[in-house]
Amino acid sequence: MKPRTKQLMVVGTTPDEILPLVPLAKTLARAENTGLLLCGLVTVPPHESLSTAARATQQLRQQLETPAHDGEIQVIVRVAHDIWQETRRVLAHEKCDAMLVRWADTLSLEAMREMPCDVIISNGILPGKLERILLPIRGGPHAALALQVALWFAHAEQAGISLLHATPPVRFRDAQLRELFKHLHALPEITQWLRVRDDAVEAIVENAQLDKHQLLVMGAIARPQRGDPPIGPTAQSVLKQINIPALVVKSRAAKPLNAITEPATPVDYTISVVVDKWFAENTFHAHEFENIQQLVDLKERQGLTISLGLPTLNEEATIGNVIKTMRAKFVREYPLIDEIVVIDSNSTDCTVEIAEQLGVPVARHPEILPQYGVWAGKGEALWNSLYILKGDLIAWIDTDIVNIHPRFVYGILGPLIREPRLMYVKGFYQRPLRLGRKMEARGGGRVTELTARPLLNLFYPELSGFVQPLAGEYAGRREALEAVPFFVGYGVETGLLIDILNQFGLSAMGQVDLEERVHRNQSLHALSKMAFEITQVVLQRVGETRGVELIQEENKSMKLIRHEADAFQLDVADIRARERPPMLTIPEYRALRGLEGNA
């Protein structure tokens, strides 16, 4: 099979605009061995924040994914105030050669003129049997593209082409036009010639009947005038009168001599708008990925391997159920995960025994790379796990989850499998907090709201759209995770967010709604230490960026207030935001992965 060097993008704002074009797009894609992309557009009124479209974006993405899924079609959904300006940006970014769009009055002349690719406008659905194609030719700048499209369908459907010759005799003085018609006469696919001497629109409509032709292909207007329909008055008049599907094409090479030159609306690149747009486009919901077989098919087509790491420290109450749930769904029922490994931090309860009894390998992280020293902390366990986990995609979930469900895994893996542009995905959820005998549905995440998010908003506003930056459920591509350092303790999640942002950019990051997560809540004493370390991480990264040391070594201890009986006392805790270097710089890792030389 030839490698695909071209890309066709189907554009629309609703499933009704996009999905009926998929069969037609597939025919075009097969004819040219072209990649196929469905682009859904969500419009937001100018006075509203783009972030308000997050739910609509998820719904449209899900509506497009399921019927379009066959492993050959990529789906993206974008949010904008000006959808056609956004379309131009996507076409350029995705390096698309052609755009297929449904005929609609919303496509303005200015929008059509500025598209950086060929444009194909459709007004109908291909019939089940295509025998004859009607191709009106006047010799304008879009004639070559109209001919090419007609030939693609003729070859794909074994159909004949009727060429409707509407060129005035005076134009045959042009040598290039005479050469074109000489070429047309030599094409075996053109089996009928129809000469038009009077009204071209009337002739096209007369021949665009289902018993004569089942598809019309014609060029758009060559030199649009102000006030013209985008496709031109001739094509517009024809489309309103016929009952067969039609394609109106415009070649990107054509440059109208009297093109309208109104300035395009400027794009707002302020941080607030960038984050709002990211939030709407890169916030997913676990429901979008609950078709696990679809994820398995995509994983296999991409040749991916996936590892699930389960960090543990005294989780005997929950680890068994976590392992049973994940293995039952992702190993036995669906082969989505290639390995499950428990990464233990020297548990003193029965955590290790339970995991081993269930047949899951256990790696004690202090024993993985001891030559580099051993530190305590979740981040230390995750960093070490990169050395032993084998997958191209690596997912980690906390193991103290009481309401464990497969969505905690397919939710964070789904975006990575579906969208190759993403490098890292975090989960978020409602976190109930027990207050005496009552449960506060959204009371959890106190360090998130009182420390992490305020600090990120101040110093890394690009990350301000993450709902729960400290969530313990996340997944990433190995190429991203191995390239960044890991803080060994509570600061690991914050550090990963900042460092992946700096290396790969905000557009490579995503988040997914995992609904509700129930786990044991920590004491304020423990949360205070967590907040202190997270603050260190942020200030350390800020200082490195600015070339200054914001935290003195002697300030890395924290005085904790302890209340006993009627007295208070101060305890001192040494809390240092230590970090491990990128795993990619470790010689043993490079040798294990077969990487050339030292980092």
Image: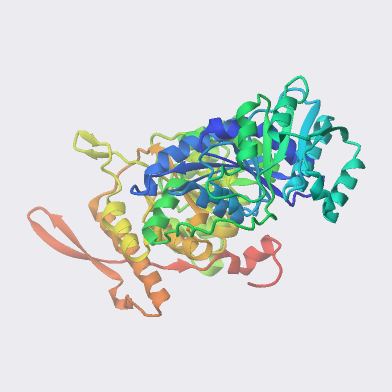
Which x, y percent locates residue 36?
Answer: 67, 42
Say left or right for 308 vs 305.
left
- The type of colouring in the image is rainbow
Splitting the image into 4 quarters, where does residue 452 fall? bottom left
| Residue 406 seen from this side | no
Say left or right for 183 vs 44.
right
Residue closest to the far top = 211
Q: Quadrant of the C terminus?
A: bottom right
Q: Quadrant of the N terminus?
A: top right
Compared with 370, 35 (above or below) is above
Q: Residue at x 40, y 80 (%)?
A: 547
Splitting the image into 4 quarters, where does residue 554 fall? bottom left
**Between residues 424 and 392, which one lies in front from this camera angle?**
424
Say left or right for 186 vs 46.
right
Numbered disc total: 0
Say left or right for 42 vs 6.
left
**Between residues 119 and 540, which one lies in front from this camera angle?**
119
| Residue 538 seen from this side | yes
Q: Residue at x 34, y 70 (%)?
A: 539
Which x, y percent locates residue 373?
Answer: 50, 68
Which x, y percent locates residue 138?
Answer: 76, 43
Splitting the image into 4 quarters, where does residue 190 fall? top right
**Between residues 486 and 26, which one lies in front from this camera angle?**
26
Compared with 289, 230 (above or below) is below
Q: Residue at x 38, y 45 (%)?
A: 45
Q: Residue at x 54, y 64 (%)?
A: 370
Residue closest to the far bottom = 548
**Between residues 422 and 408, which one lies in front from this camera angle?**
422
Which x, y percent locates residue 144?
Answer: 77, 47
